[in-house]
Amino acid sequence: MPKPLNIAIIGHQFMGRAHSNGWKQAEKFFDLNATPILKVACGRNENELAKFANNWGWEEISTDWENVIIRDDIDIIDIATPTYLHHDMAIAAAKNGKHIFCEKPFALNLEQAESMLESAEEANITHYLNHNYRRCPAVRLAKKLIEDGKLGKLYHWRSTYQQDWLANPEAPMRWQLQHEYAGGGPHIDLGSHCIDLARYLIGEISSIFCIKPKFVNERPSDDSNKEEVTVDDASLMAVEFKNGAVGSFECTRYASGRKNRNQFEINGSRGSVVFDLERMNELEYFSSSDTQEEQGFRKILATDPAHEYAGNWWPPGHIIGYEHTFAHAAADFLNAIAHKEPIHPNFSDGVECMRILEKGSQSNAECKKISL
Ligand SMILES: NC(=O)c1ccc[n+]([C@@H]2O[C@H](COP(=O)([O-])OP(=O)(O)OC[C@H]3O[C@@H](n4cnc5c(N)ncnc54)[C@H](O)[C@@H]3O)[C@@H](O)[C@H]2O)c1
């Protein structure tokens, strides 16, 4: 019998909804050795929280996350709050022996990240950091092709993460634009996803050069005044990997018309792959092993039972979406707890990612290439 595990989620908006759906779908579509119980939903606004809990089937609500974390009947703390809260919540959860499912970016800075990892390791809990794009079937296929040597020696990583919700200079102030709450702009928010994918697919980074421009200094706040934007507006990074490959990253919220375009291309001596989240079921693959007359990029629809995760959903060709990556993460996390096995990305990956992003910020400040 799968063991029931009681979850307390903190945060009930965008990620609160995505995670709630993930827990529920994981149970319906995957073989689990632990059963997720949606026990307590935490937030600040009791009315909103009650509506959220009712909609998703959370048994209880609380506006006091510190009290929930110390409860003996809670097994998992799901952190779906703004970044500045991740540190204190994760440390408290680890100290109370709870397994942790934490949103990205991991922390405000490397120092926080290191203490979160230390607490989690000391407590011997299962810790997961939700860079969910690792769990797209097409990304898993890219990983497999690389591991099978189908791309040969890796030369290039080229990634962009483009959104456009700040292209209008009158778009209002939000916590994501304030350093004390977000820890940075797209450099850390979108850049952490891209660095995680690059580390997963290519390997460790050995040096970085970065520029972080600022386009709009002030934005309208709730009280009809203007408030200072204290984070970067874009991030451009050029990196060297330890295995000799080189990479580029461009992350922005000012790419008019681009809603959530998380895209990468990898070129190797024997082939290339291209992934675009906006067409997330597909992987483009070029193989130089094809005959000269047949060579060209082919589009693989990663919805076959042979593709990781895909067989748990629908017959081939019946595509999946963004929310499924959360179900994949929830399923893998629950099984990792049940089998007492590590899951990636985890807090250790979070520390490495924060280290790279901080070196990027240092490179921007000092206007020079920085080694890791
Ligand atoms: N993996 C992804 O694809 C993805 C996408 C978007 C956001 N995120 C990350 O998820 C996290 C949350 O982002 P979001 O977009 O859901 O934010 P949001 O602003 O939509 O929601 C934040 C939630 O946190 C709650 N909260 C804030 N302060 C609190 C407190 N003191 N106590 C209890 N609850 C509190 C709010 O009530 C709200 O429910 C961020 O770290 C963000 O970077 C990840």
Image: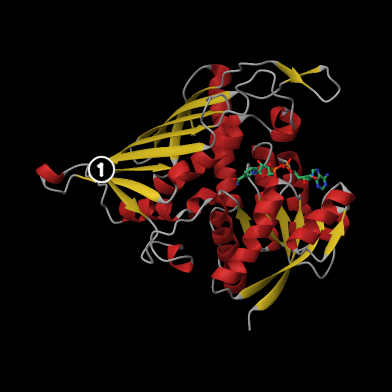
Location of residue 292 with respect to 96 vertically, above or below: above
Q: Nearer the viewer, residue 315 or 230?
A: 315
| Amino acid type, label 1 | Phe
Residue extending farthest to the bottom is 1
Image coordinates for residue 74, horizontal then vertical, percent: 78, 67
Image position, residue 171 (x, y; %)? 69, 23
Judge whether 86 appears above or below 224 on screen.
below
Which quarter of the frame holds ligand 1?
top right
Q: Under 8 Å from ligand 1: the CB of mark 1?
A: no
> As drawn, is 78 to the left or to the right of 65?
left
The structure residue drawn at horizontal position 62% and vertical position 29%, both measured from the top left corner, is 165
x and y percentages locating residue 231 in the rendered image: 67, 25
Q: Residue at x 43, y 59 (%)?
A: 318
Please tell me which residue is depicted at 38% across the width and 63% down the height of the picture.
316
Callout 1 secondary element:
loop
Q: Is residue 92 above or below residue 171?
A: below
Q: In the figure, residue 217 lies in which quadrant?
A: top right
Residue marked by disc 1 = 297
Of residues 125 and 52, which is closer to you in this image?
52
